[in-house]
Amino acid sequence: MTDEIRDARTVSASMHGRDRVAHAMGMAIDAVAVGSATVSMTVADEMLNGLGVCHGGVLFTLADTAMAHASNAGDERTLSTTASIEWIRPAMVGERLRAVSAVVERRGRNTIHDIVVTNEAGDTVALVRGQTLTLGGRVTQEG
Amino acid sequence: MTDEIRDARTVSASMHGRDRVAHAMGMAIDAVAVGSATVSMTVADEMLNGLGVCHGGVLFTLADTAMAHASNAGDERTLSTTASIEWIRPAMVGERLRAVSAVVERRGRNTIHDIVVTNEAGDTVALVRGQTLTLGGRVTQEG
Amino acid sequence: MTDEIRDARTVSASMHGRDRVAHAMGMAIDAVAVGSATVSMTVADEMLNGLGVCHGGVLFTLADTAMAHASNAGDERTLSTTASIEWIRPAMVGERLRAVSAVVERRGRNTIHDIVVTNEAGDTVALVRGQTLTLGGRVTQEG
Amino acid sequence: MTDEIRDARTVSASMHGRDRVAHAMGMAIDAVAVGSATVSMTVADEMLNGLGVCHGGVLFTLADTAMAHASNAGDERTLSTTASIEWIRPAMVGERLRAVSAVVERRGRNTIHDIVVTNEAGDTVALVRGQTLTLGGRVTQEG
């Protein structure tokens, strides 16, 4: 395991430890490296919307969380500035969902990420494309 | 109160009653009519991300919920197909946020909505533009 | 006429003088100030796509040009980083189109703009939301 | 060559023959099949903006044209409804650009496409993600 990978895991674990939303949703950080991350979650009853399927905002939150881990893994504070989502198919209670975030391009301090959310069958549930802005300063905190 | 407004409220109440996510987040449907809705929520501890501010996915979920009420208020089942968000400024614990959704344009069964999320000071926290697709069939359910 | 408005016009005229695309399309800069601009154009035969209506890319170019004038009017070099378009209704040969660009929000060096393209009847033809990044350095050039 | 591929080429050629914008810009349809297309173009003097680089609207138009060929190649009339662009790096006069459009997902009559615009060095110049709506009716016209 290289130092960069180890560092990315350390940063990610630090973020995850403080992320109340990710914990409430039972998200797991399956993999992380500088610029990429995989986050998974099982659709629970309390994630349903008024139509009985997983709330579109929950799907977005899963994808956004993956992007946050991918973009902060280098231990430079990074904010999401904009993102768009395409909802492809509904996700049902009990389904295990996985969001994979990857860097598409960097232009200076702005980075573009593509995130794909899939279900257990490998079908695409949602696509997110987002942009982050690297502010600098460390993500991990002392003391 | 016209029949259309009353009907919109009935549909919205029916959706809201079944929306587990909206309830978990303590959302209130402040106003709803065919094509528009106002939804509010207070940022709670469990909505924070790893940086100590309201999770971007939570802000998106609030806006998306407003769009869902606005777009389904005519009692025809309507799905969100795509949406984009611009995060403008962070929201802190204890802040009361309001999302106002309004129809920008309709083209056939596709409708475009603009949603503005503001804080108590009236500052913009996030902007969302989304598209919905009217499938038809009633939102309110019998028995 | 205030100095700021006069300066905005000077910057805009300088940009417009060098914009080959705007000239080829016969665009006119009707109004400009720091953060806002109105650009108009008549749909010509050579702007049609294979379906006989104004090419979607031409509509986008008109809106993008308005955003460029609005965002550079302060005489600081500014780039567009991302934009999205919603095509609402087709534009026909001979129609005079107008794009009005306005700043929605600024967050540091990133600015969000909304641009509305309308036809002579005042109907919306397209909506564009874009983001610009202020790089600094002057837009107007010496000698 | 299968019938489907031959048909896609026929439809595409029919569209291209009527596309005044594509002709004015010297676009070539390098490849087309149902759901995918490659369109190329050389940046000419008249495609420059006020900053001396290829106008962002021209880059968008190239991508949008590729999406139009990909989405209409099945000979069912298809409209673009929304698209977003990320401008990655500038394109200079004389550069040969290529836009490759591919279907990401279909959901009923709405289809999502990703288009990548690259320069001769293979660097990404722009990314476009768009949605089309299949209206039906033939693209190719009689007589």
Image (cartoon, coloured by chain):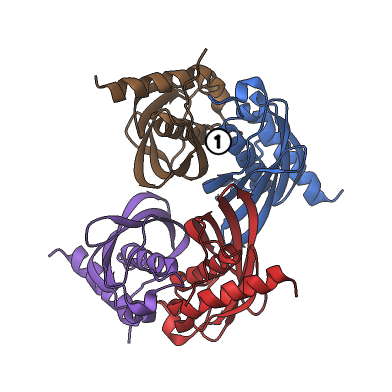
Chain colours: A brown, B blue, C red, D purple
The residue shown at (39%, 19%) is: A10
Question: As drawn, which residue projects farthest toward the front?
Answer: C143
Q: Quadrant of the C terminus of chain D?
A: bottom left
Q: Quadrant of residue B91?
A: top right
Question: As drawn, which residue projects farthest toward the left?
Answer: D1
Residue D5 position (above or below residue B73):
below
Residue A141 position (above or below residue B70):
above
The residue shown at (55%, 23%) is: A21
Percent position of residue C84, x then y: 50, 57
Q: For mark 1, does the 10 Å Cα neighbourhood hold few (<14), some (14 to 19), or many (20 or more) residues?
A: many
**Residue flagged by tag 1: what amino acid is it?**
Gly
Chain identity of mark 1? A
Residue labelled with disc 1: A57
Q: Is residue B41 left or right of residue A65?
A: right
How many numbered discs?
Answer: 1
Query: Can residue D124 be spotted in the picture?
Result: yes
Taking depth in this image into account, of B12 and A119 the one nearest to the observer is A119
Q: Is residue C61 left or right of residue B75?
A: left
Query: Can residue C123 be spotted in the picture?
Result: no
Taking depth in this image into account, of D124 and A99 the one nearest to the observer is D124
SS label for mark 1: helix
The residue shown at (49%, 59%) is: C80
Q: Is residue A29 left or right of residue C93?
A: left
Percent position of residue C71, x then y: 57, 62
Percent position of residue D87, x then y: 41, 57
Q: Is residue C83 left or right of residue B29?
A: left
Percent position of residue B58, x then y: 59, 32
Residue C88 position (above or below residue C15):
above
Q: Quadrant of the N terminus of chain D?
A: bottom left
